[in-house]
Amino acid sequence: MALLDDMLVWSAKELKDWQSDAVRRLFQKVTLDDGDYSDLLLMLKSTKGVPLEAVPKAVPLAAEHLPASGGAGTPIVLEALHSLKHVNRLADDQRLVFLPKGMTVVFGENGAGKSGYSRVIKNACRARLKDEPVLPNAENKDHLKEIPEAIFTVSRGDGISVDIPWKAREAAPDELASVAILDTRCARAYTNQEGELIFAPYGLDIVADLARVVFPRLERAVRDELHGINTADTAFDDLKNGSTAVGAFLRGLSNWTRDETLEQELQFSEENTARLTAVAAALAEKSPADKARELEELATRITTIATSLEGLGEGLTDEALAALREVDQSLQGALQTEALAAEQLRGSEGLLAGTGEGAWRQLFTAAQAFIASHGHSTEAGAPCALCQTTLGEDAASRMRRFATHVAQDASARADDQRHLHEETFSKVRRATVAAHLDETTVAYIEGQAGGWTAEKQRYEAELEGRRAWVLEAGTQTHDWTGSAPTVNARPAAAARRIAADVTNQARTHREAEPGLSREALQKERDELTARQALSQRRDALYDLTKAKRVHYRLSACLEDLKTKPVSDKAGQLAESAVTRQLCEALAKEFEMLGVSHLQTSLKARNEKGRPKLKLLLDLPGGQRPEEILSEGEQRVIAIGSFFAELSVAQHRGAAVFDDPVSSLDHQRRQRVARRLVEEAKVRQTVVFTHDTVFLAELIAIAKAQEVPSLFQHLTYSQRAAGKVNEGLPWRHLGTRDRLDKLEGLARAFAKDEVNLDNEQCGERSRHIYNQLREVVERGVEEVVFAGVLQRYNDYVRVPNISNTTGLTPQECAPIVEVYDKAKDIIAGHDKSSAGGFVPPKAAEVAADIEKLKQALETIRARRSPARSASAPPQFSPAGHLTQPARM
């Protein structure tokens, strides 16, 4: 119908997915369970960014979720309901069939199983209220956990039958969505103090429940969760109330505060800790100036130690080693040049080995110095300065050549390099690599930097190893290709850091002197103290921020739970649904059902956020409707509203009615029966009833209006209920159907007679004659008097029919004869023990049945010329429409 189409558009365009999901669930279940509310709450929270582990996916409302109106396309035709398992106490092997066109009536007394079948149909066909769950047999504890199931056989216009399985707790089959079910709650009627009868068409109650039930419950859940979130910052009271930057930060803490900001505020380094210690100590000092001088002196001593340590390694740095290597390599080059010159000096004269080289050169240079200092000569004839013998010409010439060699550059350069090398490496040998420091100052350094003394000793050992390597390479191996041992220890650097810290402490103590600088120092101390305290509450700060974020996001959920937009929409939908067509349909239905005396009009309104339609009644004295209207009238209003809705929706699918006449009197039963038969002309109609008077009305009206009908009745036993039987119970069968049944019993008697003894034959014949007597009485009512009168007295005076005007004695005699014979045979009369009782044979029984049949046919035949060609239909024993009846 148009209302449902409007709701689909509203759901798609104006509702969030989770809200549309809620509407879908209301359509499918009406009453949501805890699992539904849990899912909806998770979906709602996820839309606001609340951290969640798993969120069900929203399934917004769509056309396939709605009970189809039946107006579009070819509706399905119910053919049968069968293969039921674990459905209440219903027997499993039953098959309930439905007439494709016309009316199917299922009659069952209380406890016969009628409700079990109707509940299956309601659940499978998406009844508008599913508050009647299908349960297994409660009397069989072995089956309590079984899931009820059944199979529907259906067809469409193509005539092809299809089995549709149904199972409880599962989604209703889509194929059965077009079956409309009379649920009096689809047109709820309530009374209020203003004297208005409220009628809410199906669909509006869904919108109402969304605002009246679902949103409030979700809101309570959100508020309960909000109440459980602790966003109090009392753990930071000592910090947030101060004038520090930390206090300002805490006062401004909110759900918007980012984690990066939190981390920045929580940072408190070792330098911060040292600074706080120094500032606090300076402010606590009684004489900051004296302490400052003391610290400055200490800083000077520590600096001196650092300088001393740095001086130890000055000659062994990488740059110094490069210079030493150059000196050594220069010497080696000079010596090679000198050796080459000496080799040339010696030539082939056979001079002593080593002549012209270093030791020889020292010897010769010393001799020259002796000669020069004493005025001696090196000419021929002069005595030799060394051996004191007279120099010959050759010796004098050799002495002159030697002097020339010594005076050459190679020899002089080699001599200079020897002196430089000796002096350079002598300094390395003499260098000190162990510092002797002031023990008091060293103790302070050790106190500030534990392990500093060991670091100093390692440093000295590394210097000594480096020096040994240099001396070996420069004075012994002259091999500089390897890597010199490294010096990794840095005691001087540590000492300078401590000196700087002490200097800062001294400066801080200077600032601690009374004045503006001290006030600034006090403020710095407060800031550092607050930051240190905050850094120690990391987890608490993150927990508080997380709580604020969740609280904010949960609070945002409340915006989506405001009922006013939904209530306003309900009012709009109500107004659009209340059309002239619906009003006219209601008036027509009320006229047919006999409540047209109720002057009504429809008006849409909202009450406490719940959209409703008001069925306004013109009542005297401002009395409330329930004080005026009977329960039956209220029931009829619900039935009329249901038919009006189907009419407006142009619904042509099957319609199922479950005990539609409860609380109705005979006249209204008749009106409802007439309305149902009228409806059966245009749609497949199924009626479940336990009301025998209503059943009789349906039979009579269906016959009169020639509406195809199928009747079935249910029986039960101590073991199971819901046994399906064709046709109607015996007491509801007509004369012809009863005679057909008796003929069947007579044929069975004739077949079995040969195997029966006399007592068994008597029992069989008495049973048949007992029913034959009932047929006689029903024949008098239906045939003799042509149904003009319908009795409410169980007793029929059959012998008096001979007094009836228009009947001949010949026509009456067979009827009275069969009746009297049956009266004498039936078990209701005690037989005299003195008299013998010979039970009739099967042939005699069949003959009496035929006698009665022919007598009734004779009476019918006399009336046949006066009957219309369109005689009322007759029904077979199975309840199927056959041919026009002959009374």
Image (cartoon, rainbow, N blue to C red):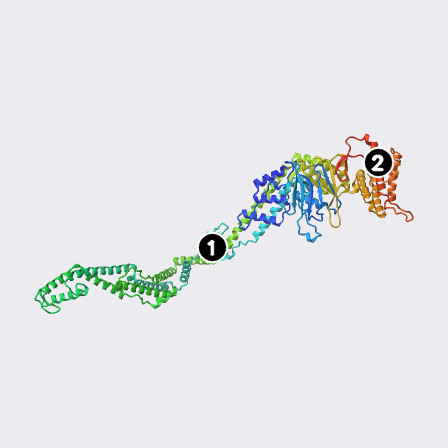
Q: Residues within 10 Å of mark 2 (few under 14, many from 20)?
A: some
Question: Which comes sooner in the sequence, label 1 or label 2?
Answer: 1
Residue at the image position 16 percent from the left and 62 percent from the top:
346
| Of the two numbered discs 1 and 2 in the rendering, the one whose residue sits closer to the viewer | 2
Q: Which mark is residue 181?
A: none
Question: Quarter-wise, where is residue 186 in the image?
Answer: top right
Cα distance, mark 1 to mark 2? 113 Å
| Relative side of 742 to 294, left or right | right
> Residue 679, how many percent across, how many down?
71, 36
Q: Is residue 449 above or below residue 670?
A: below
Asked whether, in this view, residue 546 is left or right of residue 339, the answer is right
Q: Is residue 597 visible?
A: no
Q: Amino acid at mark 2?
A: Gln
Asked whether, in this view, residue 785 is left or right of residue 475, the answer is right
Q: Point out residue 869 in the picture as x, y percentages from the top left corner.
A: 78, 30
Name the one closer to the observer, 863 or 187.
863
Quadrant of image for the C terminus: top right
Q: Amino acid at mark 1?
A: Gly
Q: Residue furthest front?
A: 754
Which quarter of the rendering shows the N terminus?
Answer: top right
Residue underneath mark 1:
247
Image position of 414 with respect to 252: above or below:
below
At numbered mark 2, what does the secondary structure look like: helix, strand or loop?
Answer: helix
Residue 750 in view (yes/no): yes
- Could you say whether the residue bearing mark 1 is in a helix, strand or loop? helix
- State the residue position of label 2: 854
